[in-house]
Amino acid sequence: MIRKVILLSILFSFMAGALFARDDIRVERVQFEQGNDSAIIRSSITGYDTIDYVLGASQGQSMTASMATDNTASYFNILEPDEDQVAMFNGSINGNQYEGQLPETGDYKIRIYLMRSAARRNETANYNLEIIINADDMEKTSQTVPSDNDALVSGTNYHATGNIPCTVANGQPNGFCPFGVTREGNGSGLVTVTKPDGRTRVIFFENGTAIGADVSQADPGEFSAKKESDLSIILIGDERYEIPDAVIFGGCEATIEKSGFPMKVQSADHTLLPDGPNLLANTRWRLIEFQSMDDAVGILRPDDPSRYVMRLNGDGSVEMRLNCNSARGTWSAEGGRDRSSGRFQFGPLAVTRALCPPPSLDEQISSQAQYVRSLLMKDGRLYLSLMADGGIYVWEPQTEEPYRTEPSAELEAAVLQVFPDYTRDVVDLYGGVGGVRYVYGRVDLNGDGQDEVFVYLLGSFFCGTGGCNLLLFSDTEDGYLLINEFSTSRIPIFVSDESTDGWKNIVWLKSGGGVPSSYLNHTFNGRRYIEGNKMPADKVPMGQSYLAGELLFDKAISLEPRN
């Protein structure tokens, strides 16, 4: 208890210091000389000095801002008119160079500051800030750029960039790959996709149809393509890419709702971004790192990112796995006009208080969540920033959910009720060979806000050549209630985007016992899941995978038998 009180006291002091340090912001208005559309400001800041350079601009004008400084801890943010906290551009994430069209008319603030670690040491930053406003770009924002005069994304040879759903190897989960598109007009052009290993795949389009790719004799498969509404599905051996029409046609938008991650594609200077009336609703993320503004702390990375998972539900609730603890609460977000940044806040979180083995970030995250104030989407990652430059949590899309290995007495009791013949006598009879272990995973299959629980049992008592027993429970106020007992199954379990009778379909690989391998689909009949159609074993099913990861018996949880 003393340790937790000290941690909270330190946190309060840290946040209070950061908040009070920026109260006195010097404001200077920028005036361009007559006939000029640019200005260069040479100045310096020391310690906690913060300067807002204010300049008036109109919607649709292009602004370029760049800063050269002799202190690598000095940055600038850009704030929209009437905004004092949430930045539309964050230099500490994007670098000290901005170029883009302004979303509204009013006074913009370019805020110069030192990172907290440098400010605390009372360092000085000398800088040259150059600001350019192009009046010729007025009123272009709302216009659609025709394909034969398509604007290029700044710093690239592409008309649009972003991320698309992809799978690049058999057995891998669905993920996202960066792309760039070069448009030739009328739905023709080239889409260049970058694979996770850094290699590229170029896909050719003609009149809106994918007609080929840069396939060589070394590629282990032929090219094929099909259209599903406004989506092109491209298959090249084990590779699969999903490309919306908006990528190749431009000048419009299209929503992807695959893998539980709704996203939107936009043209020049935009990437695929969360869409819909509820920004980021029904998305899953895992923590990559925490970027502290204090160089004494630096960058903190979890040993295992899969143990720090955040699920932002469409009803405004949030669920977190924080190492050996879990948290539940609420969240809200409001997208900015540039659709890549905006406001973000967590409501109060209810957190379990188990003592996780060090090193662990669970206490830090649960304590600091209340201070998150803004979001930024960049390169498919979600950056959640604490107020007053307190730090940044960096998350990436979670495309698979690893199995859990934290013991649960209530869950074990439910399993023993299903198998009353799993007793100490049976274990002793086989000299301990009959010992059983288990892993489990949670997922809301019917959208009611309450998780269902998969339990996968290991050991000779429950396994055969075709796999092992899989149980599916509903987690209710009255305890765990059995929905299904599957006699043989293999993990991971794929939870499809498709539903039957309000419950998502579930799929796993069926193999062994002399039966040809295939993926077996299961649908809900109103009471339980039943077997459905079979699918080829060489094509990984679409959907989120659960109970994922290399399964080692020694890592699973021991299930003690009945006495």
Image (tube, grey):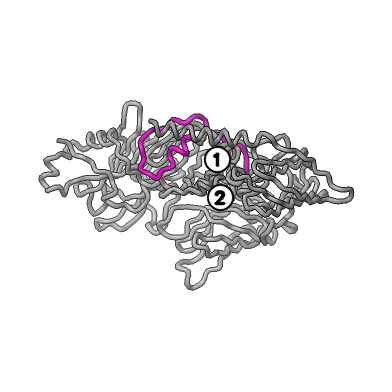
Q: Residue at x 77, y 38 (%)?
A: 106
Name which residue type carries label 1: Leu
Q: Which mark is residue 280?
A: 1
In the drawing, does residue 143 fall left or right of residue 2? right
**Mark 2: which secondary structure?**
loop
Q: Horizontal placement of 478 versus 126: left or right? A: left
Q: Are marks 1 and 2 in contact (CB under 8 Å)?
A: no
- Which image quadrant for residue 352? top left
Query: Percent from the top left, x then y, of residue 403?
Result: 35, 46
Image quadrant containing the C terminus:
top left
Q: Is residue 371 above or below residue 186?
A: above
Which mark is first along the chain, 2 or 1?
Answer: 1
- The secondary structure type at the circle numbered 1 is loop
Q: CA distance from mark 1 to mark 2?
A: 12 Å
| Nearest to the observer: residue 395 or residue 547 | 395
Q: Which residues are magenta?
A: 341-367
Give the x, y percent position of residue 396. Answer: 51, 48
User: The N terminus lies in which quarter of the figure?
Assistant: top left
In percent of the image, x 48 and y 66: which residue is there? 222
Decide: few, some or many residues near mark 1? Use Cα within 10 Å; few <14, some 14-19, many ≥20.
many
Residue position marked by numbered label 2 in the rendering: 380
- Image location of residue 19, percent across then percent down: 60, 34
